[in-house]
Amino acid sequence: MEVTKIATSPFDGQKPGTSGLRKAVTVFQQPNYTENFVQCILDSIPQDERKNCTLVVGGDGRFFMREAIQLIAKMAAANEVGELVIGQNGIFSTPAVSCVIRKIKARGGILLTASHNPGGPNGDFGIKYNTENGGPAPEGVTNEIYSRTQTIQYYKICNEISVDLATVGSTAWEVEGRTFTVSVRDSVDDYTQLMKEIFDFDLLKKLISGENGHPPFTFVANAMHGVTGPYLKRILCKELGAPETATVKCDPKEDFGGHHPDPNQTYAADLVELLKKGVHQLGAAFDGDGDRNMILGQNGFFVTPSDSVAVIADNAKCIPYFAKAGLKGVARSMPTGAAIDRVGQKLGIECFETPTAWMSIIASTKMSVKDVLKDFWKKYGRGFFVRCDYENVESEGANKMMELLRKAADDGSLVNEIFKGGSGDNQKSYQVKSMDDFSYTDPIDGSVSKKQGVRIVFTDGSRLVFRLSGTGSAGATIRVYVESYEPDEAKRMLDAQQFTGRDAPTVTT
C-alpha cells in the first residue's frame, strides 16, 4: 500500500486546551480540517518515538466519531505508527483510554470526544491527545500541536486502510515495506479488570443483594446515552448483580438522545425527580465521555462535586486499593470547592491545586449518602458551593469582563474591602483577603499555565472564582464559582443557594 502526500494550508483557531480541540461538527467536516489537526498531533511525537509506536484510539460515540477513527487509521499508517488499539465500535471512555494506555505502555492516545457538549450533526465534536502516562497532554505539548497547525503544508494518508470496528481482533497491512496493525478490543474488559483491582466486588455484591444483613441496596445509574452505558451494564449488572432496571439510558447515541450529556441538576433533572420519590438510596449520572459524574442521595439529596471528592478522600480506607497502597496526596481544580484541602491537612498529605467510589463507602460505613455528608461536615465544616454558568455569551464582552477583573487582581484595589452576602438570619460579611489571576506550574515538566481564572479569597476561607470556559464550541461560557465556608453546625443543612443568595442564569451545579 502506498502513502500519499496531500497539500494543505492552515486553519485559524486550531488551538487545543487540555480538553483538546472542540468545535461544531460542521467545522470538523470541512475538507482537510480534521486531517490537518490529526497530522499535527502525529508530528508532535518525535519521529524516532512515533516510528512503530502504539496509539490508543476511541471516543464517546458521538456523531462523526466513526469517520474520524477511519481517518486516523489511514493517517497513522502513513506516518509510521506501528499499531492502533481501538475500542470495539469505536467506544472508549476517557478513564478506560487512560487505563489501556498505561496497561499496554502505549505512546499515547487520541480521544474523540467533546465531553459534556451536545452531539449530533448540529452538535459539537472534539479531538484530544493523551500522553504515555494516560493523562491529557500538558501545555507544552498542546502548544507544540498548535504551533504546527499554523504552518502545516501537507498531510500523509494511506487511503486503502479500512477498519472493521465491530469485530474484535487484529488486522495487519503492509504499508511501503512496513507492517501496520489495528487491534480492535473490548475496552470494557480492561476497565472492569482495573475496577476489580481497586474495589471489593464481593462486598459490593452483598450490599446490592442485601446479603450483609440489610435490605437490598437500591440505586439508579444514568449514562445519559453516553459512552459509560456498556461499562455500567457490565460492572453493575453483570459483575455486581444489580437488576437491569438499575441502569438507564445505557445505549450510546450519536446525539445523546437529543439531550445535553452534562450530569447536573439542570440537564439530568429526570434523575433528580426520580430520586426525590424516595425509592432509591443512591443516584448517579455520567457525562458523555465518562470522566465526570453527579451523585444524589435518597430524596434527591445533592452532593456537590467538591464534597464528593473530599468525602472519598476522607473515606479512602473503605476502598481496598487505597487501604493497601495509602493515599499519597489529593488534588482538585482551582475553582473546585476547598473541602478536600481540609481533608489533606488533617491526613497530613499534600493537596495540589490544578487548572481543571461512593458505593464502597456506603457498604463499609452502613450509612446513607446524606448521613455520610453530615458526618463529614461535622468533622470539617461545610463549604456551601454553587457554580453558575452563563452560556453562549458574546465573546468580546466576556473578555472585557475578565480584563477588568485581572486589572483589579493586579492593583489589589479590592483587598480589605468588605461585602455582605446572604439574606435575613443568614446574612454574613466577607472581607477580601487576596485576589489573583491563577497560574499553575506543572511540577513534572515545569510548564506554566496562565490566566486560569480570577479568584477572590476572603478572610474566612470563602471564595469567588471567575473564569472563561474553553470547552464550548461557540461564544463564551462564563463560570462563576461561589463558595462560602460555614463552621457553624446549626447552619450546615441550609440550601446552598439560600445561603449564598445566588441564582443561576443557565446552569447551577
Image (cartoon, grey):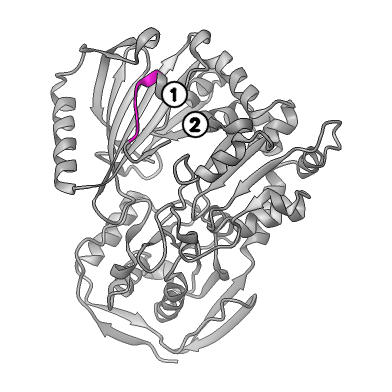
Relative to the observer, which residue lies in front, 73 or 498?
498
Question: What amino acid is labelled 1 in the image?
Answer: Ala
Per the model, the C-alpha gap separating discs 2 and 1 is 10 Å
Q: Disc 2 marks which residue?
A: 304
Rendered location of residue 419, percent (x, y): 25, 14
User: Mark 2 or mark 1, which has the lower sequence index?
Assistant: 2
Rendered location of residue 10, percent (x, y): 20, 71
Residue at image x 55%, y 70%?
Answer: 86
Element under disc 1: helix
For this view, does 117 lie left or right of residue 225? Answer: left
- Circle number at residue 14: none
For this view, does 255 lie left or right of residue 247? Answer: left
Disc 2 crowd rating (10 Å Cα; few below 14, some 14-19, many 20+) is many
Rendered location of residue 351, percent (x, y): 47, 28
Q: Is residue 502 magenta?
A: yes
Which residues, given as a range, are shown in magenta?
499-504
Residue at image x 53%, y 25%?
Answer: 349
Task: Establish if 379 lies above or below 165.
Answer: above
Residue at image x 68%, y 41%?
Answer: 219
Residue 233 in sight in this render: yes
Task: Establish if 495 lies above or below 171.
Answer: above
Element under disc 2: loop
Disc 1 crowd rating (10 Å Cα; few below 14, some 14-19, many 20+) is some
For this view, does 487 lie left or right of residue 315? Answer: left
Q: Check the picture and name the quadrant holding the C terminus.
A: top left
Relative to the observer, which residue lies in front, 295 or 322?
295
Residue 357 in sight in this render: no
Q: Is residue 40 magenta?
A: no
Question: What amino acid is labelled 2 in the image?
Answer: Thr
Q: Disc 1 marks which residue?
A: 496
Q: How many marks?
A: 2
